[in-house]
Image (cartoon, grey):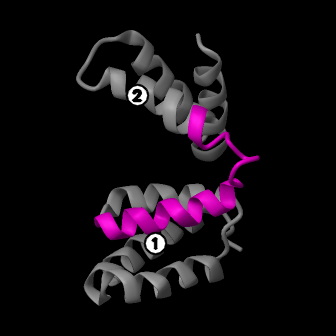
């Protein structure tokens, strides 16, 4: 296993839980099934090479940037996943609200409202799991 895979697996586990990280790793290493390479690349590239570059850009700030991009791209499912990641990276409800307000101006009301719904849905799911969102 590569160093990037190790780092990515550890970070993915920290954010989304060990079970999900182990499942992603096993699927990627299996080489079987539709998208198995994507699972491996997810751990190696974004999680192993990009999200671990804390000295260049702290994870909290990277979460701000990525959420802004995902909102602009209208990627509801990814917005939900990155809401979870943003909370793990230190974003607060107030931070998410400020991201939403910026999106209103730069992406338009309909797109920002879709993002707001995804963020609030992710909050509700996390709270139902007993997680606290500061």
The x, y position of residue 12, in whole percent, is 59, 38
Q: Nearer the viewer, residue 55 or 79?
A: 55
Identity of the residue drawn at 50% across and 22% down: 25
- In the displayed structure image, the side of residue 96 where residue 37 appears, left or right: left
The x, y position of residue 31, in whole percent, is 34, 11
Tell me which label, 1 or 2, sits earlier in the chain. 2
Magenta stretch: dominant SS? helix
The verdict on residue 51 being magenta is: yes
Q: Where 97 sits versus 64, above or below? A: below
Magenta stretch: give its range: 49-74
Does the CB distance between marks 1 and 2 fall below 8 Å?
no
Q: CA distance from mark 1 to mark 2?
A: 24 Å
Residue situated furthest front in the rendering: 56
Mark number displayed over residue 132: none
Residue 129 occupies quadrant:
bottom right
Identity of the residue drawn at 66% across and 68% down: 91
The x, y position of residue 112, in whole percent, is 35, 81
Identity of the residue drawn at 64% across and 83% down: 94
Residue situated furthest right in the rendering: 55
- In the displayed structure image, the side of residue 82 where residue 95 appears, left or right: right
Which residue is tagged 2? Answer: 39
Residue 18 occupies quadrant:
top right
């Amino acid at each position: 296993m590569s160093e990037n895979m190790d780092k990515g697996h550890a970070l993915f586990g920290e954010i989304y839980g060990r079970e999900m990280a182990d499942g992603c790793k096993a699927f990627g290493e299996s080489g079987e099934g539709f998208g198995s390479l994507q699972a491996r690349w997810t751990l190696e590239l974004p999680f192993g090479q990009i999200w671990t570059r804390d000295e260049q850009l702290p994870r909290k700030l990277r979460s701000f940037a990525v959420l802004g991009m995902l909102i602009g791209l209208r990627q509801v499912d990814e917005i939900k996943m990155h809401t979870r990641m943003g909370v793990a990276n230190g974003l607060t409800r107030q931070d998410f609200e400020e991201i939403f307000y910026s999106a209103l101006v730069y992406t338009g009301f309909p797109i920002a409202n879709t993002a707001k719904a995804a963020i609030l849905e992710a909050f509700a799911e996390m709270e139902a799991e007993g997680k606290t969102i500061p």
